[in-house]
Image (spheres, rainbow, N blue to C red):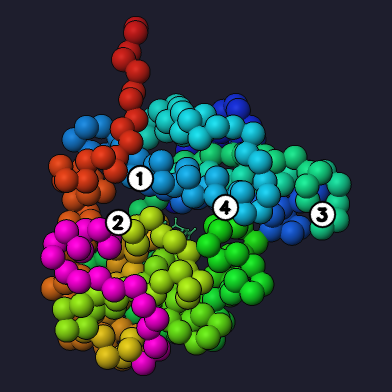
Amino acid sequence: MKQADLIWMNGELVAWEDAKVHVLTHALHYGTGVFEGIRAYETPRGTAIFRHADHVERLFKSAGMYLMDIPYSREEIRAATHETIIRNGLRSCYIRPLVFRGAGPMGLFPLDCPVDVTIAVWEWGAYLGDEGKQRGVRGKVSSFRRISSAAVIPAAKATGQYVNSVLAKIEVDKAGYEEAILLDDRGMVCEGSGENLFIVRDGVISTPGFAADILGGINRASAITIARDLGYEVVERDIARGELYLADEIFMTGTAAELTPLREVDDRPVGSGEPGEVTRSVQRAFEDALHGRSDRYAEWLDVVEVPARTA
Ligand code: PPE
């Protein structure tokens, strides 16, 4: 992670060091925030934000599910994001919009607290490593189950809900693995700590559906579209833990992780122990889409227009 110069905070760009909040910020105590993870890439058409409108839409949906009114329009958030990238002089970056209940009355009832909005951008390399993207990472099923819709709203990208992913991530990291796989409360495969999961068996791609309490990943949707366009059958269905051990290939998708293969699960090699053919071909087409090398998916890119120099 590389620090940038400016962060957008409630309508203004402030210095990175000055983007601060009060300790009685409601979201710090109760996790009452929603956020996004977005990436912008350098493409032949200039810097472009991947599926920006879909991310902004999910941010508003997440906020709505927690009854938070965002005091800006979708277009204002989009424009603010463009401005933040341009003013930081970045050609590619990770983008983190955050909408949270700010400092106001303490106590659980949040609706009288202000809704604050920040947008930070920074340069961020491959989350599970470049080598992980190439060779695959080692995953482990966590003993912590994924949060269920009996308790919270797994479809919302809410900050407080992430203590679940954090516990799973710490557990598998301490055990010597790179990524956690969480089962849902029924014991079916759900997703990674910050990625959706796909298995490939006999050429068919399967991924858990919304009934498994997944977060509806935007890269999950992209991978499904791309795989189908490549002619693969993609099925959304429940996946039993044992199927992880039978899979020929497994890969995960997420904004931070992009498309990362798993080469091992619970100390068992996945397939040959190297990323397989299906994973490779979906990954190649996915990378082409992210980096603007694909005409077919050109409409997924929101190009950041850098103003012409006047001086
Ligand atoms: N599940 C979870 C729990 C999750 O956090 C993410 C994104 C996904 C699935 C995939 O969603 P999408 O990015 O729309 O394809 N995780 C974000 C946060 C990661 C972090 O470490 O912070 C991300 O990838 O930006």
Which comes before the other along the chain, label 2 or label 3? Answer: 3
Category of crowding for the residue at label 3, using alpha-carbon neighbours closer than 10 angstroms: few (below 14), some (14–19), many (at least 20):
few
**Residue 248 placed where, x, y %?**
21, 84
In this view, 294 is above or below 308: below
**Residue 126 placed where, x, y %?**
34, 58
Which comes before the other along the chain, label 4 or label 3? Answer: 4
CB atoms of marks 1 and 3 within 8 Å: no
Instruction: Give the residue number, with chain letter if any, for mark 1.
Output: 51
| Label number found at residue 67 | none
| Label number found at residue 222 | 2
Amino acid residing under circle 3: Phe
Q: CA distance from mark 2 to mark 4?
A: 20 Å
Amino acid residing under circle 4: Ser
Residue lying at 24% horizontally and 75% vertically, measured from the top left: 205
Is disc 2 placed on a helix, strand or loop? helix
The answer to whether residue 215 is seen in the rendering is yes
The answer to whether residue 3 is seen in the rendering is no
Q: Quadrant of residue 70?
A: top right
**Residue 265 placed where, x, y %?**
35, 85
| Label number found at residue 62 | 4
| Label number found at residue 109 | 3
